């Protein structure tokens, strides 16, 4: 499972011309799911996301987590995080989980993240055509892959 985390001053997701969710200061988390992903991947990533110290203290050093700054989290499913561009110019998504498997893992991810965060998490709709608006703060962008826990 891969996540791309962006520290944001604000972010929203629009589906069919309607804003489905929005947050202010916090994290925008894109989630890509592989066939081999399991609950252990979810638990490792959600704990890491909630505890990541990527918000600035008074001295401008990244020292606080999203919980400590009373931030918010917006989660977006994004199978393209598993794009392979090794051959040719058209990305292959062979490593991305099939939708019927990925949706359950995505729902489990949202539930676990909500539990670890100890407050509601906003999200888009799995598999929908979404328009994402964000103001990247910093910019700070972090890539995590549960295959690289070490």
Image: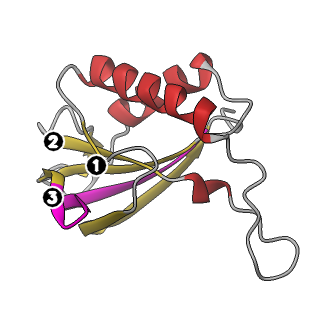
Q: Residues within 10 Å of mark 2 (few under 14, many from 20)?
A: some
Name the residue carrying label 3. 19
Say whether marks 1 and 3 touch (CB < 8 Å).
no
Which residue is most to the front?
Answer: 16
- 60 versus 85 height, above or below: above
**What is the distance, in whole Å, between disc 3 and disc 2 at their CAs?**
20 Å
Determine whether, in the image, residue 77 is placed left or right of residue 22: right
Quick one: quadrant of the C terminus? top right
Residue 9 in the magenta stretch? The answer is yes
Magenta-highlighted residues: 1-19
Q: Quadrant of residue 88?
A: bottom right
Q: Position of residue 135 (x, y in %)?
A: 22, 69
Q: Is residue 120 left or right of residue 1?
A: left
Of residues 147 and 109, the one nearer the viewer is 109
The residue at which mark 2 appears reads as 71
Nearer the observer, disc 1 or disc 3? 3
Q: CA distance from mark 1 to mark 3?
A: 17 Å
Between marks 3 and 2 in the image, the one whose residue lies nearer the viewer? 3
Q: Nearer the viewer, residue 127 or 32?
A: 127
Residue at 45%, 22% in the rendered image: 108
The answer to whether mark 3 and mark 2 are in CB contact below 8 A is no
Using the numbered discs, state the Cα–Cα distance from disc 1 to disc 2 in whole angstroms.
7 Å
Task: Note whether 87 is above or below 16 in the view shown.
Answer: below
The answer to whether mark 1 and mark 2 are in CB contact below 8 A is yes
Circle count: 3
Circle 3 crowding by C-alpha within 10 Å: few under 14, some 14–19, many from 20: some
Q: Quadrant of the N terminus?
A: top right
Residue annotated with mark 1: 27
Left or right: 134 as drawn, with respect to 88: left
The residue that appears at 66% across and 32% down in the rendered structure is 149
């Amino acid at each position: 499972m891969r996540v791309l985390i962006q520290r944001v001053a604000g972010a929203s997701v629009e589906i069919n011309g309607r804003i489905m969710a929005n947050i202010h200061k916090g994290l925008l988390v894109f989630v890509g799911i592989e066939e081999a992903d399991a609950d252990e991947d979810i638990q490792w990533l959600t704990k890491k996301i909630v505890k990541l110290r990527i918000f600035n203290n008074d001295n401008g050093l990244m020292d606080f987590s999203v919980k400590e700054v009373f931030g918010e989290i917006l989660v977006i499913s994004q199978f393209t995080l598993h794009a392979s561009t090794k051959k040719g110019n058209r990305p292959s998504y062979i490593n991305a989980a099939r939708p019927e498997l990925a949706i359950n893992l995505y729902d489990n991810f949202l539930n676990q993240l909500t539990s670890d965060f100890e407050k509601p998490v906003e999200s888009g709709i799995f598999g929908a055509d979404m328009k994402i608006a964000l103001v990247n703060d910093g910019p700070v962008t972090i890539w995590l892959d549960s295959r690289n826990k070490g």
